[in-house]
Amino acid sequence: MLYLSILKGMFVGLLGVVVITRFLGKKQLSQVTTLDFVYILVLGGIVQQAIYEPHIRFHHMLFAFFVWGGFIWIVETSAQRFDRFRTIIKGANSVLVHDGKVNVKALEKSKLEMGQLRTLLREQGVFSVKEVKHAVLETSGMLSVMRYAGKEPVIKEDILVNYPDNEPTYLLVEERDINYRNLDHIGKTKDWLLSEIEKEGHMLDNLYFAEWNKLNGFYFQTYDEKESEGAFFTK
């Protein structure tokens, strides 16, 4: 009976976590705010109690998820509708660099040091503050950076009139297994894939992975290749 109770608690817990995290939207882990993290911690506590506390019944757990889910819905809906409430609950963005100058007050208010700001800049590929025109610390803790125009990398559009657009790459083979979903998506067959692999002198059983796109063709790596040699490309 105890094992059945644990299974029920885990099932309802998983279902509740999936449903309630839908309220948070499609966010990456790096976009999760402090409030979102609190949501998740409380959910974990509810699931833990349901599993390890024998006096917690099935309906108790459902009630806890219902109440907590309703609270999340109220907070998130209010934050979307009312700017002042959103600022109080989730905070606001901070401009740390403006027109190439570090905003010391904003930096101190955000509890950051100059070294930490430089670390955040390096994570964005910027290794000197003099390259930065504007830098904004988002509520998620990520730093958005705008460089001076002269410091931005050159792109094809700056120097070329006609150039091919990028094409998505599809993983067709992974650890000897064919990805039929991707193969169907590009309108190819298994026979075509095996024929192309054979043309390049490979066998399916020896492929670690194979990528393909319309522009560049195949990119292979076999189990026999050394890491120093890497994979090779063929069109």
Image (cartoon, rainbow, N blue to C red):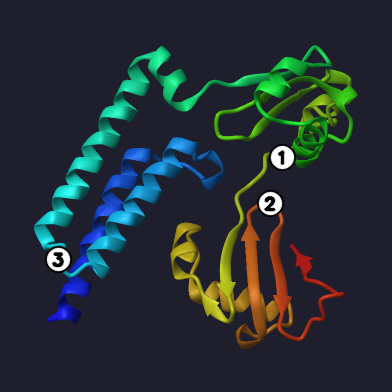
Q: Position of residue 108 (x, y in %)?
A: 71, 23
In terms of secondary structure, where does tag 3 sit?
Answer: loop
Q: How many marks?
A: 3
Q: CA distance from mark 2 to mark 3?
A: 62 Å
Contact between labelled residues 3 and 2, with CB atoms less than 8 Å apart: no
Disc nearer the start of the sequence (2/3)? 3
Q: Position of residue 19 (x, y in %)?
A: 26, 49
Q: Which circle marks residue 184 in the picture?
A: none
In terms of secondary structure, where does tag 1 sit?
Answer: loop
**Along the horizontal axis of the image, is 61 left or right of 154?**
left
Disc nearer the start of the sequence (3/1)? 3
Contact between labelled residues 1 and 2, with CB atoms less than 8 Å apart: yes
7 up-or-down from 233: above or below = below
- List the residue tagged with mark 3: 55
Say what amino acid the circle numbered 3 marks: His
Say what amino acid the circle numbered 2 marks: Leu
Q: Position of residue 161 (x, y in %)?
A: 79, 27
Front position among marks 3 and 1: 3
Is residue 220 among what the camera can see? yes
Q: CA distance from mark 3 to mark 1?
A: 65 Å
**Along the horizontal axis of the image, is 217 left or right of 171?**
right
In what quadrant of the picture does the C terminus appear? bottom right
**Residue in the image at 24% along x and 42% along y:** 68
20 up-or-down from 189: above or below = above
**Residue in the image at 45% along x and 44% along y:** 37
Q: CA distance from mark 2 to mark 1?
A: 8 Å
Q: Nearer the viewer, residue 142 or 115?
A: 115
- List the residue tagged with mark 1: 164
Q: Position of residue 215 (x, y in %)?
A: 68, 51
- List the residue tagged with mark 2: 215
In terms of secondary structure, where does tag 2 sit?
Answer: loop
